[in-house]
Image: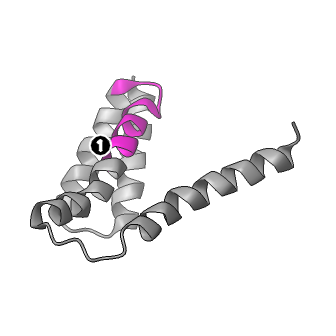
Amino acid sequence: MSVAIYIAIMAGVTYLVRMIPFTLMRKKIQSRFLRSFLHYIPYAVLSAMTLPAIFYSTGNMITSIAGTIVAVVLAYLNLPLIVVALAASGAAFLTGLFL
């Protein structure tokens, strides 16, 4: 198969996944539990995708843990995202140099 067919199939599947809920659920969701459940799904999916990538991105668990600890502490202190990202990357890099 050519690359164009693969891209067309992926586009169709992506479109269907996004449009089916809109066509099936025309009324507002009344269930408080279901609305609460749907509200937290993006956070759960994002964390499920991000956490494994954090710990296996460097190839060394110790450097990943060092970067994560620095990121969590700086984020808790409400520092800007660029500062947190650069400090976490620097911590992982420096930990890798010393190992």
- Give the residue displayed 72% in from the left and 49% down from the top: 9
Location of the C terminus by quadrant is: top left
Q: 81 or 18, which lies in front?
A: 18
**Chief SS of the magenta region:** helix
Question: Residue visible at 33% across and 42% down?
Answer: 48
Number of residues whose C-alpha sits closer than 10 Å to that of mark 1, classed few (under 14), some (14–19) or many (20 or more): many
* Residue 74 percent coordinates (x, y): 23, 58
Mark yes or no: residue 77 visible.
no
Q: Can residue 93 be seen in this view?
A: yes
Q: In which quarter of the image is residue 12?
A: bottom right
- Which residue type carries mark 1? Thr
For disc 1, the marked residue is: 68
* 97 or 43: nearer the viewer: 43
Specify the farthest residue to the right.
Answer: 2
Magenta residues span: 47-61
Q: Is residue 53 magenta?
A: yes
Q: Is residue 15 above or below residue 70?
A: below
Q: Residue furthest left?
A: 32
Q: In which quarter of the image is residue 52?
A: top left
x then y, percent, for residue 1:
87, 36
Q: Magenta stretch: residue 49 in it?
A: yes
Name the colour scheme.
one colour
Total number of numbered discs in the rendering: 1
Helix, strand or loop status at disc 1: helix
54 or 60, which is in the foreground? 54
Query: Which quadrant would residue 42 be assigned to in this image?
Result: bottom left
